[in-house]
Image (cartoon, rainbow, N blue to C red):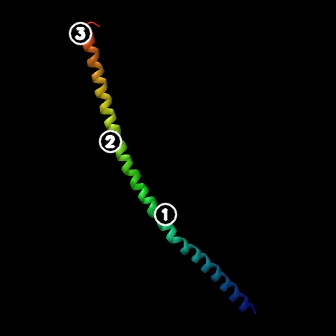
Amino acid sequence: MVKWIVLAVVLFALLVLALAVRAVLARLPGLRRAAVALQRRQAEAEALAGSAQALQARAETVSRQLADAQLRVELIRANRGD
């Protein structure tokens, strides 16, 4: 009698394990698609970060050029006596 109870408990545990494994395996394709989408977005973010750095460098260059131009205008005005 005890042998049958132990066998029933083991079979029930195996059934629960099989159902859990089935649920995980059913989700794997969705998880893979999500991982691929995240990798694509990461690549896009890295590309945008590179563009942002280039834009920042260009903005700094333009800012320096603007400061130089303003200095030149001030020098010209000072030479004219305005």
Q: What x and y, as percent, mark residue 35?
A: 46, 63
Q: Does the residue at mark 1 contact the one at mark 2 (Cβ under 8 Å)?
A: no
Side (left or right) of 35 relative to 66: right
Question: Looking at the picture, which amino acid does disc 2 mark?
Answer: Ala
Q: Earlier in the sequence, mark 1 or mark 3?
A: 1
Side (left or right) of 31 relative to 5: left
Q: Earlier in the sequence, mark 1 or mark 2?
A: 1
Question: Looking at the picture, which amino acid does disc 1 mark?
Answer: Ala
Residue ID at (37%, 43%) = 52
The residue that mark 2 highlights is: 54
From mark 1 to mark 3, how far is it between C-alphas? 66 Å
Q: Is residue 1 above or below residue 60?
A: below
The residue that mark 1 highlights is: 34
Q: Is residue 65 above or below residue 72?
A: below
From mark 3 to mark 2, how far is it between C-alphas? 38 Å
Q: Is residue 14 above or below residue 82?
A: below
Residue ID at (70%, 87%) = 8
